[in-house]
Amino acid sequence: MTAPPLAGTAKTEPSAATRGRSAVLAAGLLAALGLLVLVALLSVALGARSVPLSTVLTAFTAPDGSSDHTVIRELRVPRTILGLGVGAALGLAGALMQSLTRNPLADPGLLGINQGAALGATIAIGLLGLTNPAVYVWFAFAGAALASALAYALGSAARSGASPVRLALAGVALGMVFTAVSSAILRMDSQAFDRMRFWLTGSLAAQTSDVIIRLVPFMAVGIALGLLLAKPLNALALGEEAGRALGVAVGRTRVLTAVAVTLLCGAATAGAGPLWFVGLAVPHAVRAVVGPDQRWLLPYAAVLAPVLLLGADIVGRVIATPGEVQVGIMCAVVGAPVFILLARRRRLAAL
Amino acid sequence: MTTPVRVGPYSMRPAPRALVVSLALVAASVALALVAISTGEFTVPVADIVTALFGQGTPVAELIVSQLRAPRVVTGLAVGAAFGLSGAIFQSLTRNPLGSPDFIGFTAGAATGGVLAVVMGGTAVQIAAGSMFGCVISAVLVYALAFRRGVQGYRLVLVGIGVNAVLLAADNYLLTKANINDAANAGAWLNGSLSGRGWDHALPVAIALAVLVPVCCAVSRPLRMMEMGDDAARAVGIRVEPVRAAAIVAGVLLCGVATAAAGPVMFVAMAAPQLARRLTRSPGVTLIASALTGAVLLTAADLAAQRLLAPTQLPVGVLTAAIGGTYLALLLRKDRR
């Protein structure tokens, strides 16, 4: 532990070592962005019908209306953009939730928030017959907000805060209820069931580009808000009292984090269905490398989670040609082992 | 403490409350069964049920009673009992209400095995075999992954949740690979449903119960002692390892055979032992009362699932998941002192 800075000298010059570390982390973030661009290009190029990268580039610079270019512009690009947005949203939401609840098992899927959003969207699409995503996304937000409030209320004990296991159990219980109600609604309407079947598994292919365009603003606002919360969350990591002493508005930070999580999870679920584990695995992996500083953790999680999601989506497309494995399935297969590894740790350390 | 009753070399200590509760549960399940068989779109008077079952009633009543409603009710009772018993065994072994097969991935494993058989166009026997196999594999997997100098309660539950997620993903994958008819069948089965169950579904569960209930009775008392810890149980002369092995085998088989018949119906295995414990005011998990509670729960849930949103028929698994999840949430709430 370093000694706390004395009053008046709080704004000392960062030491050479700190600056060096910052430079390394910034370079790493750039490299991660480069990786993301590469994966995005691969996601556009690869699939049941793979296209060389040069054709991908000409599809943007000089579209000639050939079938390859049509596939790229109408199918692959929207899908990739959706993957970028959903991945960033879920990775950031997971990191924010882990930070806010100080719970290593926090994940939008595990805590039932994505299932709550899915229930909201199911009610809107299946029961009320709404088709405009700019309208039904609000139902997804309502579902996500309700689910996160319920999970937190059930999972937290008055004295000791939310214990990791209790929060996970509350989330799983709620997720089951939400999923059951969703499937009961879909049972009554076979047309809605047919429309929503793939979406409920978690798929990036289930949406058209006009839907995606309407979801992007919500994701963008959520991501911006989430990234801005890094500093107060850093202070809160020391505990509520210490955070308050460092000048953080505790209540406001909590509320804003909850708003960001709700926006991110609601928009991501409205786009790709209820996905598990993306928000769990990526922040843990990132934390192992960059450490607990939220100012680095949050952007890294937002950049690397779409790498995982798009990577999983590409693998799902390639391993089962001519069909494909939906990304929700791939996420569970990739993410659950991480979760099991965490669960096997002797003590679930609070974050 | 009640006075022991001795008959020759055997002695037992009857628990009057448990006995009364068990009899009441039997009466409740009979009453539910009669309601389920006699009412519906076509009402069969209770008096006509027996004649119809023995082939003495009108052809319509016979068709409805002995081909449609009775097998469904019997399957429901048997599956509920099997889930209740299996849940009681594992909750006793893990000393944790969440250590029940539907929560730690055993039921999901049985479901995946069953779906694999359904998707490959398997017969009823192959589906049952697939379920049993899947249940055994997932049980081994969960225990192996959770093992770390012993299997500690919450680690088992968390590992089970993780394995559960992978198995659900596997189910979804199999559904997308299947042709549309198989996928529809498998999807309906995966919800957990008693609709359209015939005698060929009821029979395997009934046979499994007939064989395994005596085994469970035999291990019931040692299991109760083992809830106090292996060392304490050994000190009073219980051979811990064989008892545990027998209990695990019985629990896995019951879970597998029940899932094969009705699909993965969630929460009966979790809730039944807890309710039975509260009803009998017993200090530990009670096996027989749990089985009876499971039978009553599932039959009542199926009746409600058929009638609540009529004419829409809900699969019973959807209803149990909705009720059970709420119950679990309340349990967590109450648990936070």
Image (cartoon, coloured by chain):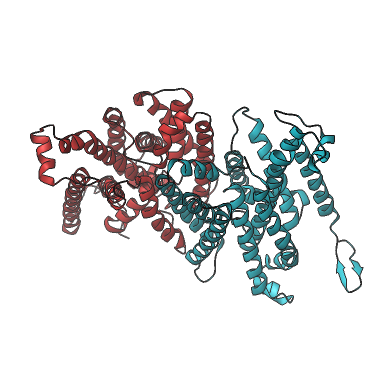
- Residue A78 % position (x, y): 24, 35
Image position, residue B50 (x, y; %): 82, 40
Give the image quarter of residue A15.
bottom left
Taking B36 as reference, is B151 above or below it? below
Q: Nearer the viewer, residue A320 or B141?
A: A320
Residue B335, horizontal then vertical, whole percent: 62, 48
Left/right of residue B303 with respect to residue B57 in the rendered view: left
Colour that chain B carries in the picture: cyan
**Residue A102, percent across and down?**
42, 49
The reply to whether residue B240 is in sight is: yes
Question: For the N terminus of chain A, which image quadrant?
Answer: bottom left
Rendered residue at 47%/56% (across/down): B163
The answer to which image quadrant residue A348 occupies is bottom left
Chain A pictured colour: red
* Residue B311 higher or lower than B276, as above or below: above
Residue A144 makes an appearance in the image? no
Identity of the residue furthest to the left in this view: A62
**B234 with respect to A255 (left or right):** right
Question: Could you tell me which residue is drawn at 43 percent across and 49 percent down?
Answer: B174
Report the front residue among B168 and B332: B168
